[in-house]
Amino acid sequence: MSRLSWLLRETKSWVRSGIITADQADQITGLYPADNKNRLIPVLLLLGAILLGTGIILFFAANWQLIPKWGKISLVVVPLALFHLAALVTHANYPFLSRTLTLLGCIMFGSGIWLIAQIFHINAHFPNGMLFWLLGVLPVAVLLREELPLGLSALLLASWALAEHSSSPLIIFVAMMLFGGVFYLAYNLRSSFVLAVTLISAAIFANTEIYLILADNYRFNEAGSLIPFVLLLLGSAYVYMSKHPINEHIGDFPLIYKFLGVTLTGAALFIMSLEFFAHDFVKLRQSGAGYVLFWVLYIAVAFLGAYAISRRSTDIKEVLKENYAWLAVDALIFILLLIPFKEMTLMVGLNLFMFIWALLIIISAYQKQSSLFFILGMFAFNLYVLLEYFNFFWQSLPKSLFFIAGGIVLVLCGALMERQRRKAVLAWQKRGGTSFEEEL
């Protein structure tokens, strides 16, 4: 429900109750103009562009051997030019269509790189194709100030880092500089879509490089299993960025940061509760592989959190009240890095903390009247219960009884979520209205 829809519903109830007149209701709602942005149209056009681009590439691939060389070059150059020309022509009257055509032109540019390489039998380093595609799309985003090419640039940047599969300082430096440029443009355009894509791509890049650093430089074979620990650090960093002054007055930026931070943290805690993580983390501590690296990352996140939190309040009680879920996560990371636990103790502790964190998110969301994060917390808690049920009873129960009991658990969890949601909404309405977005 949008804020305007909520206001219209409430003013009608105020008029019925005699609190205000119909004219006063019109004056109040008139202060908040309707958002005429139809999100269905750009979504349909974007899906159409993806399907059309995929279809064109598949058609070329299926008939490639039958097309002469000059025809192949024409099939690369002509659609590329036509898409961008059509985008220019339709820009004034059909902006959504123009953006979609620009995206198609960017997709054709990328496919053209590999098609030209195949035509002339150019045998080159595969990741370079991703990099050239990125370097071709990014200027289009800069010059036209378009969201879709910029979002594609962020995805290509993560794809290039994955394809390179290298912990070379040069690769890391170039990628970080390019990510800095994409983040700058996302803030310059104030684009929530680009920010979300860029944050996801940055998480992929960070995990890839840290894994490669551990695997290549420290010869730690279990490096991939420590990715959830990196996700936990990233989740905390994203949540603290939602409180950073730079995001306070930029649309949905704080909400996007916190939503991704909660999602990453919840996923990381679940993976860390599994047996293999405890085994590999204990092995990491014993070998010393990347131990200093994790401390550096933790200190960086802790300083970010301290800065973001202190800018809002310096009162210790207020800080604890507003951030106890994330201070608990920071304390967990600190304890994991400081104390050498035994494998079983670590696994039990992480399983327990997983449920504690979900409860803290629910309590925090309830206090702030945030419907979105209240539902996320409830979903995480019930999902953890279900997954723990699978872990403990899959081997011990007969399969028929296992699924019957599992179905009962699911129904009970769903009923509990609905009941708690209704109770929360009613409580919020009594205290002055229901909030569907967090009060940051």
Image: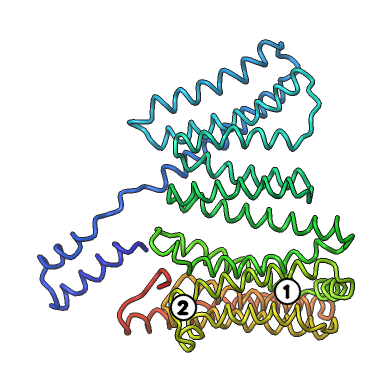
Question: Quarter-wise, where is residue 348 in the image?
Answer: bottom right
Q: Earlier in the sequence, mark 2 or mark 1?
A: 1
Q: Quadrant of the N terminus?
A: bottom left
For residue 325, side relative to residue 310 (left or right): right
Q: Which residue is tagged 2?
A: 421
- Picture coordinates of residue 101, whole percent (x, y): 48, 31
Q: Nearer the viewer, residue 198 or 168?
A: 168
- At x 78%, y 84%, the residue is 339
Element at badge 2?
helix
Q: Amino acid at mark 2?
A: Arg
Name the residue tied to disc 1.
403
- At x 70%, y 21%, the residue is 116
Residue 417 is situated, as x and y percent measured from the top left of the image, at 53, 78
The residue under the point 79% across, 80% down is 393
Which quarter of the figure is the C terminus placed in? bottom left
**Vertical side of 296 occupied by 328: above or below:** below
| Amino acid type shown at disc 1 | Phe
- Relative depth, front residue between 116 and 100: 116
Task: Work out which residue is located at the far bottom of the displayed protein and give it.
Answer: 317
Residue 419 in sight:
no
The kind of secondary structure element at disc 1 is helix
Estimate the x, y position of residue 64 in percent, counting from the top left. Answer: 72, 20
All told, the count of numbered labels is 2
Horizontal side, residue 388 vs residue 82: left or right: right
Q: Residue 361: image x %, image y %?
A: 54, 78
Q: Which residue is rendered at x = 74% and y = 73% of the image?
A: 272
The image quarter containing residue 359 is bottom right
For the residues labelled 2 and 1, the Cα–Cα distance comes to: 27 Å
Q: Is residue 110 above or below residue 265?
A: above
From the viewer's perspective, is 392 left or right of 60?
right
